Image (cartoon, helix red, strand yellow):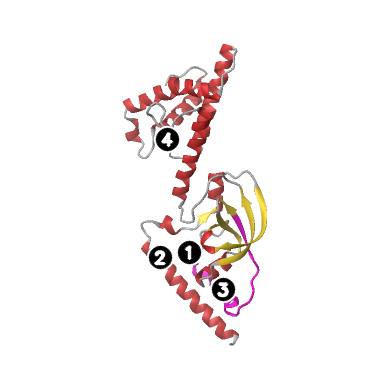
Amino acid sequence: MSDELFSDLAREDFAKVRKREILIKVMNLLHPEKISLLSLDQIRNLLKPKKEEYRGMQTVPISKIVGSEDRYKDFNRMFLPKHNYMKNRWTSIDRAHLRNFILPPVSLYEIGGVYFVRDGNHRVSVAAVRGVMEIDAEVVSLSTEISLDPGMTIDNLTRKVIEWEQKIFYTAAGFSAFQNGAEIRFTSPGRFDELAGIINESRVEWEKKHHGRLSFQMAANRWYHESYIPVTDIITAGELLRLFPGRTKSDLYVWIVRHRDLLKKKYGRTVSI
């Protein structure tokens, strides 16, 4: 088969996958997040992996490749190309597949059991379109205790991270799932770390005042009854959540306390809740 014929077939393939990508986009206009390729930077910011480890060459299921380091805007979740300007690069890879050329392995990051393309996005795309089940890859693993599902959206993952942070905080504070019937619940990651900071600040103040030692669990219990419950009661009585749709009492508590701290520093005096 001539080079020109292979080129014609590759161009036809690209035209087909572009039509398919457009159709899928139209079908998901109301929920584009379901077909969006995940950004590795977003996942890193959410999971904050503490280390990375080189895992060498592996055979990776393409169904577990869910995102990209820097080309997540160029492909959808099925790795279909989203732009016509990608034609030359994509068809060159497709021609190699048609001619049974062996391509170099791709480079992937693994985190939580799923994979993100470091290098080789077009190779993954062509392989996925051609129904290839697995691909050779050089893998670097990023550590996390949270497992990821290939079908996850960024919103799904955000909720899972918050649930994980809540579990860690409750264990450290010695809290039950519902402390005295009131759950501490946030809508953004990182807030439980802020709570731990607030508790530790109050613990340090108590220890200086009383010249003694206070465990984190004891400090957390004091904080909960002397700060969290009184402030959230004010939030409930004032019906403040109506002004902040989609937020929780815990969200407002952190904002109020931090804002109060700023006012105290600004004016150099105690500011009441």
Label 4 is placed on what type of residue?
A: Arg
The quadrant where residue 242 appears: top left
Give how far across and how far down residue 248 sits, in percent.
Answer: 39, 35
Question: Disc 3 marks which residue?
Answer: 88
In terms of sequence position, does the residue under pointer 3 or pointer 2 come before the other?
A: 2
Which mark lies nearer to you, 4 or 3? 4
Q: Amino acid at mark 1?
A: Met
Q: Is residue 104 left or right of residue 170?
A: right
- What secondary structure is found at the residue carrying circle 3? helix
1 and 2 marks in contact (CB < 8 Å): yes
Furthest-top residue in this view: 210
Q: CA distance from mark 4 to mark 1?
A: 34 Å
Q: Is residue 248 magenta?
A: no
Label 2 sits on what residue type? Ile
Cα separation, mark 4 vs mark 3, equals 49 Å
Per the rendering, the mark at residue 185 is: 4
Q: Secondary structure at mark 2?
A: helix
Residue lying at 47% horizontally and 44% vertically, measured from the top left: 160
Report the magenta residues as a range: 80-109
Disc 3/disc 2 C-alpha distance (Å): 22 Å
- Asked whether, in this view, residue 49 is left or right of residue 74, the answer is right
Residue with the mark numbered 1: 78
Q: Residues under labels 1 and 3: Cα distance?
A: 20 Å
Of callouts 4 and 1, the N-terminal one: 1
Does the segment drawn in magenta span residue 84? Answer: yes
Task: Give the quarter of the figure containing the N terminus.
Answer: bottom right
Local packing at callout 2 (Cα closer than 10 Å; few below 14, some 14-19, many 20+) is some
Q: Amino acid at mark 3?
A: Asn
Callouts 1 and 3 close, C-beta under 8 Å: no
The numbered disc on residue 24 is 2
